[in-house]
Amino acid sequence: MTTPAERFHPSVYLEDERQARGWTRDDLARAMMTGDDDDWGLHRLALDLYCDVGPTNPNLQMGTDGAAAFARAFDVEAEFFLNLECAWLLARSTLLYEEIHR
């Protein structure tokens, strides 16, 4: 039987990629903006909440808008971030289920 790959909260990837690019969170928030956005502060707030609170609160999810904004910033498909989050949520649910049924 194979061992599944480690699942981690997408914020780990976001922070690693942000740091690898030499960006601050402000830089990432600006990169998440569309041409129509005039307030990067909203993206910064969402980024802070997701990265700082998200790993401990599975109810705080990025959703399709958040995935699209991260995809825009990192020049990848939004599905990449949605898949990361889905894998983490499933792994977390499995662990909780196993803990309850021991």
Image (cartoon, rainbow, N blue to C red):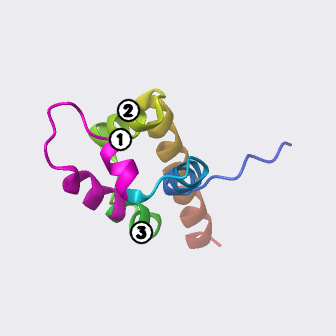
Amino acid at pointer 3: Asp
Pick the residue in front: 44 or 97: 44
The residue labelled by disc 1 is 31
Pick the residue in front: 69 or 55: 69
Residue at 26% over, 61% down: 45
The residue labelled by disc 3 is 52
Residue at 38% over, 32% down: 72
Read off the magenta span: 26-48
User: Which circle marks residue 67 in the picture?
Assistant: none
- Asked whether 47 falls inside the magenta stretch, the response is yes
Amino acid at pointer 1: Ala
Badge 2 element: helix
Residue at 50% over, 33% down: 80
**Type of secondary structure dominating the magenta stretch:** helix
Image x and y of residue 52, in percent: 41, 69
Left or right side of 29 for 77: right
Image x and y of residue 96, in percent: 54, 66
Q: Do tag 2 and tag 1 residues touch (Cβ < 8 Å)? A: yes
Badge 3 element: helix
Q: Nearer the viewer, mark 1 or mark 3?
A: 1
User: Which circle marks residue 72 in the picture?
Assistant: 2
